[in-house]
Image: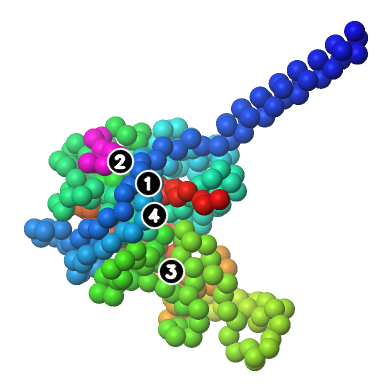
Amino acid sequence: MIQRLKIIFAVSFLAVLTIVGVNLHAQNSPQIDFVKIPAGEFMMGCSSGDAVCSADENPRHRVQITKNFEMGKYEITQAQWVSLMQTNPSNNKGDNRPVEMVSKLDIQEFIAKLNSRNDGYRYRLPTEAEWEYVARAGKDSANSGPIEQVAWYEGNSEDESHPVGQKKPNAWGLYDMQGSVREFVSDFYTGDYYNVSPAIDPTGPQLTLGGPGTAAPIGRGGAGAVPLPARGLPAGSTLQDQVNALQAQVNDLQRQLQQLRSEFEAGPRGRGGFGPGGPRGPGGPGGPAGRGRGPQQGPAVLGPDGQYIDPLDGLPTGLPVVRGGGWDQTAEFQRVSARYSYYGPTLKLGDIGFRLVRESVSK
C-alpha cells in the first residue's frame, strides 16, 4: 500500500512539474497574432495622384507576390519583446505599446530565439514589397483611410507612442501600418532600386564585399547571412586560411574605421541623423529627417572601397529600409509608398519598431 502511494505521489508530482514547465514555457513565448495574406500582385511605388512622392518611390511598377504568408496583425509589443528577451529598451514604456529602441541586429536575435522554438513556423522580417503589398491591402490610394482614423502622427500622438490596435485597421485587418512606429523590413536600401527591381518576389538589392562584382552577396535581414568570402586567396585554400584572411581584413577595416569615425563625428549633424544622408524622409538624401527619440547608436560610415562599414565589427553593411509612418511625423510622411533609409543595422531610435512574417515549415 505504501509503495503504491509512493508511485501515485511520484506520478502526480511529475504531472505538476510538466504543467508548470508548460506554463513557464508559455510565459516565455510571446503570443503574436497573425493575419493570413494571399498571394497576388499590386502596383508598388508612388500612388496614382500622389503629388509628394520622392524619387526613390519611382518608377511605379508591378510586383507579384507568389506565395501565401502571414503578417503580424500588430507591431511587436514591449510585452512580447520582454517575454523572450527579458529586457525592455523602449523609451515610451507600456506593455502594449510597440517596442522601440531596437536595432535591426537586435531584431534578428529576437527572430532567432523565436525560430529556435521549432514550433512549425519560420519567423522573419517582411520584405519591402511584402510590407507595401499588405499596407495597400488591395488599394492604390496613398493612404488606407482618413489619417486621423488609421494613424498616429504628429497631429494626434501628443508626441509619444500609443498601444497597438487603437486606430482602425486597413482593409485586410492589420493595424498601425500607416502611423505608429516606423518598421524595419528585411531589404537593404538603394535609391534607384525600383528601376531594376524584379517583378516577382523582390528582396531588395544585393550588397557585395569589396565593391561591385568582386564577391558573393551579403545575406539580407530575414533570410540569414551568407558567409563572407575572403579576398585574394589562392585556389585550394583551406577553411582556416579563409578564416585567417577574413580576420586580417577585419583588423585592417577596424584600424581604418577609427580614423573614419573621428572624421565623421567631427562633421555636421542633422536634425535627426548622423550628418548627410542620415535618417531621412521624403525628399531624397539630405532631405527632411525623421525625428528620432533617444540616443542614436551605431551609424555606419563610408569605407575606402565605397562600402558602408558597421562600427561593431568593421565589416561592410547595408542601409536598412524602414517603412510606415511614425508617431512624430507630419501627415505628409504617412503615405504607404514612403521609404526611409538609415545608417547601419545597429541604429536605435524611439520611433522605429517592427512586425513579423510567419511561414509554415514543411515537414
In space, the residues marked 2 and 3 are separated at their CA atoms by: 28 Å
- Within the image, what quadrant is residue 250 found in? bottom right
Question: Marks 3 and 1: CB-CB under 8 Å?
Answer: no
Q: Secondary structure at mark 2?
A: loop
Question: Marks 1 and 4: CB-CB under 8 Å?
Answer: yes
In the rendered image, residue 168 lying in the magenta stretch gets the answer: yes
> What amino acid type is highlighted by mark number 2?
Leu
Q: Which mark is residue 318?
A: 3
Vertical order, 202 against 146 (above or below): below
Q: Secondary structure at mark 3?
A: loop
> What amino acid type is highlighted by mark number 3?
Gly
- Residue 243 left/right relative to 209: right
Sequence-earlier tag: 1 or 4: 1
Vertical order, 16 against 228 (above or below): above
In space, the residues marked 2 and 1 are separated at their CA atoms by: 8 Å
The picture places residue 188, in percent across and down from the top left corner, at 39, 66
Q: Secondary structure at mark 1?
A: strand
